[in-house]
Image: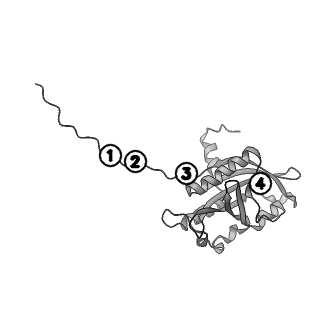
Amino acid sequence: MADPGTPEEKVTANMMHAHARTLVSYWDSRRRTDAVPARADIAAADLRDLLGNLFMLQRHDPSHHVFRLAGTRLCDLHQRELREQNFLSFWRGYDREYMKLLLESVLANAAPGRGYATAETINGDRLDIEMVFTPLASKAGSVDRILGLYQPLQSPDRFHHRPIIRHVLTRILPPVSKLWTLPVTPPPEFPDAANDQ
């Protein structure tokens, strides 16, 4: 394994799946200036190739981010309907707390975040997952929804219809909040030094 500090590892760690890039670009294109897109600004037809892996969460409180919609591939991987289920039920222990903080951070900063996990089936098969979380505003204007992508990084065909029962978080990339800069203040002007000669 390469040293995590080597440039090769950093480049690999920050790469996004093509579907993840598509979702983030689409989300950014639907924004109005600095505002978060509204749920009404999102058209499913625009994301046709991603629909099976897309989901929408609604925040009820910090511990409950409930599936409003879940793509067919996502439901098939878990062998159950996910609508009205708490997304945080995928996670246990510290992973649940970290994921809760990531979702809350995405909403508070009104910026996308990402997570990486290993999903495990009932018989121990594993699959790497990339997740993207983009915030959306409700009709009332509050930022309380997340349009997300659950993207397997390998083919799940080998699972042979065995459900995913466990997720282990491997990495989170929280949103980058807006950078606030102080105004540039010119240096104070001092009178020329007195000539003591």
Q: Residue 68: where, in percent of width, then height?
A: 71, 66
Residue linked to disc 2: 182
Q: Is residue 186 magenta?
A: yes
Q: Does the CB distance between marks 2 and 1 fall below 8 Å?
A: yes
Residue type at mark 2? Leu
Which residue reaches farthest left?
A: 197
Sequence order check, earlier mark of 3 and 2:
3
Residue linked to disc 3: 176
Distance from disc 4 to disc 2, alpha carbons, whole Å, reads: 41 Å
Sequence order check, earlier mark of 3 and 4:
4
What is the crowding at mark 2: few (fewer than 14 residues within 10 Å), some, or many (at least 20)?
few
Left of 195 or right of it: where is 20? right
The residue at the point 64 percent across, 58 percent down is 133
Magenta span main SS: loop
Residue linked to disc 4: 90
Q: Is residue 129 visible?
A: yes
Residue linked to disc 1: 185
What is the crowding at mark 4: few (fewer than 14 residues within 10 Å), some, or many (at least 20)?
some
| Residues shaded magenta | 183-189
